[in-house]
Image (cartoon, helix red, strand yellow):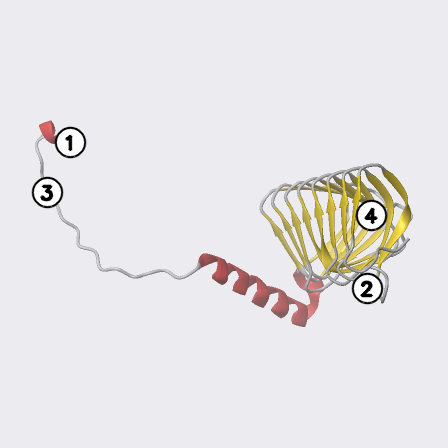
Amino acid sequence: FGLWQGSTLINHGTINANLHTDGNEHNGKHANVVNYGSIRGIGWIDSTDVLLNYGEVTLNEAQYSTGALYNLGTASTDDSNEWLDLLMDVLNWGDFKVGGALNLCSSRWFYNRGILYLNESAHVTVNGTLINFDSFELEEGAQFYGDGILENYGNLNCRSEEVYFGGILLGAGGLVRAYTKGAKIAVDAAGKSMKRVWTVLYVPCPYTFYER
């Protein structure tokens, strides 16, 4: 079912249906979903929509674009998914479990401050930026590819041999783009420093002055 333009759905129970917020005349433009219960089968999300999840959400085959997914509960993708495009930013503080196909599109960000888990059926392509601050688990058999940016500040546990990310597999052009963007992020994060002139002084003191 569709959400009316500018509307908000707050769910405390269980919903088994496709929610369409595809930004047409009646459905979904600037619509928001707040979930405290269980939703299985979130559908098209578009036009600055926000999905705020405190409960359980299962993403089916669809395109999720423009808005943002804030997950503080459990979000998962279906093992049977043959395609799922994320054209939205994801901020995960809970559990995000990936099965089936998932594509993080270019210019999009996935911030993981919880648990990001790819099971044996996962087929994930990252063309955007994935930043892990906590726990990133790749189960044996999971497929993980990409020419985007992967930054790890937490624990990355890989039990899969189907991981191709970065290195010469990017090709010359991909390497230049990846390293250029990575260098810019590092320089911007470092900020500016100030040079100062220092003078070293040597002042002998008696032992009685110690800790004064």
Inter-mark Cα distance, 4 to 1: 63 Å
Mark 4, secondary structure of its residue: loop
Question: Picture quarter containing residue 21?
Answer: bottom right
Q: Which residue is mark 2?
A: 23
Circle 4 Cα neighbour tier, 10 Å, few/some/many (<14 / 14–19 / ≥20)? many
Question: First in sequence: mark 3 or mark 1?
Answer: 3
Task: Please report contact status of discs 2 and 3: CB closer than 8 Å, yes or no.
Answer: no
Query: What number is the disc on residue 156?
Result: none
Sequence-first disc among 4 and 1: 4
Q: Quadrant of residue 139?
A: top right
Vertical order, 13 against 51 (above or below): above
Q: Position of residue 37 (x, y in %)?
A: 80, 37
Amino acid carrying mark 1 in the image:
Arg
Label 4 – label 3 distance at C-alpha: 66 Å
* Mark found first going from the N terminus, 1 or 2: 2
Who's the residue at 71% across and 64% down the image? 106
Number of residues whose C-alpha sits closer than 10 Å to that of mark 1, classed few (under 14), some (14–19) or many (20 or more): few
Rendered location of residue 63, percent (x, y): 83, 59
Residue 203: assigned label? 3
Q: Amino acid at mark 2?
A: Gly
**Which mark identifies residue 212?**
1
What element does badge 1 sit on?
loop
Nearer to us of marks 4 and 2 is 2
Q: From the image, tell me which residue sits under label 4.
A: 122
